[in-house]
Image (spheres, rainbow, N blue to C red):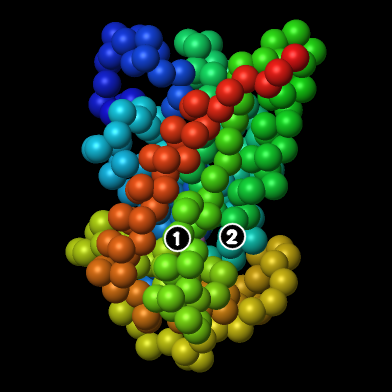
Amino acid sequence: MLLHLSTWQEIEDYLKRSKTVVVPIGSNEQHGPTGLLGTDWLCPEIIAHEAQKTADLLVAPTFNIGMAQHHLGFPGTIALRPSTFMAAIGDWCRSLGLYGFEKIYFLNGHGGNVATIEAAFSELYAEATYAGLSRGFACKLKNWWDLRGVMALAQRQFPTGHGSHATPSEIAVTQWAYPNAIKAANYAPRIAATGPIREAIDFRARYPDGRMGSDPGQATPEKGGELVALAVSGLIDDVAAFTNEPPPEI
Ligand code: NI
């Protein structure tokens, strides 16, 4: 069930049977010469939208702009500073919490978001504590590649040149979902360099075509489809486990 294609009455009815909502979250940022700018928000959106076709999951609109300041040397990247990002995540959760959502599950597609999302959760928990509302409300962050078996499959598919940015696995997922947007390039070198992530000018100097440690030329839509299928089953089970977590003993 997709929140943006539902009515408020349908959400009210959903809340009678579940208090869990899944929010795909990512970043709109350069992904090398063949990766789509939307890669990091498309991947969690693709997986969550597939999952809700077979499971009774509510999927919120995708939070598609994240912490990407280090990619701002490449046109098309749009970034939120950590402080803005935290404020926005907080208001999304407060809005959903108003209606009774108690379990907010963020399916993430961008490693650079992790620290800020976790910090936003800490702010929300602090608020709940100070308001005397500490029980019942929980947020969870899961990277899509950490869903059961997904990273192991990616390592079997791409034993060399997986890298950490503009990876063949994430590009394969977008190729599966958007075959008309597949791009080609001659990569030089075939496997990109790797190193630290700092500010945007430093990043572009170190990684001139935007890749980090990756050879995205190995991506195929078929490999993407295998990754999506595995991620969907992992997501359905992980959300169910989060929903059914027993409350703590007091
Ligand atoms: Ni990415």
Q: Amino acid at mark 1?
A: Val
Q: How many residues crowd around disc 1 within 10 Å: few (fewer than 14), some, or many (20 or more)?
A: many
Q: Nearer the viewer, mark 1 or mark 2?
A: 1
Name the element at disc 2. Answer: loop
Question: x%, y% of residue 153?
Answer: 42, 68
Write the residue at 47% across / 54% down.
Answer: 148
Q: Quadrant of residue 91?
A: top right
Q: Quadrant of residue 138?
A: top right
Name the element at disc 1. Answer: helix
Q: Is mark 1 within 8 Å of ligand 1?
A: no
Q: Nearer the viewer, residue 142 or 82?
A: 142
Disc 2 designates what residue?
72
Question: x%, y% of residue 87?
Answer: 65, 30
Q: Which mark is residue 150?
A: 1
Question: Image check: 176 left or right of 200?
Answer: left
Measured in 3D between alpha carbons, the distance from the residue under mark 1 to the one under mark 2, in whole angstroms, is: 29 Å
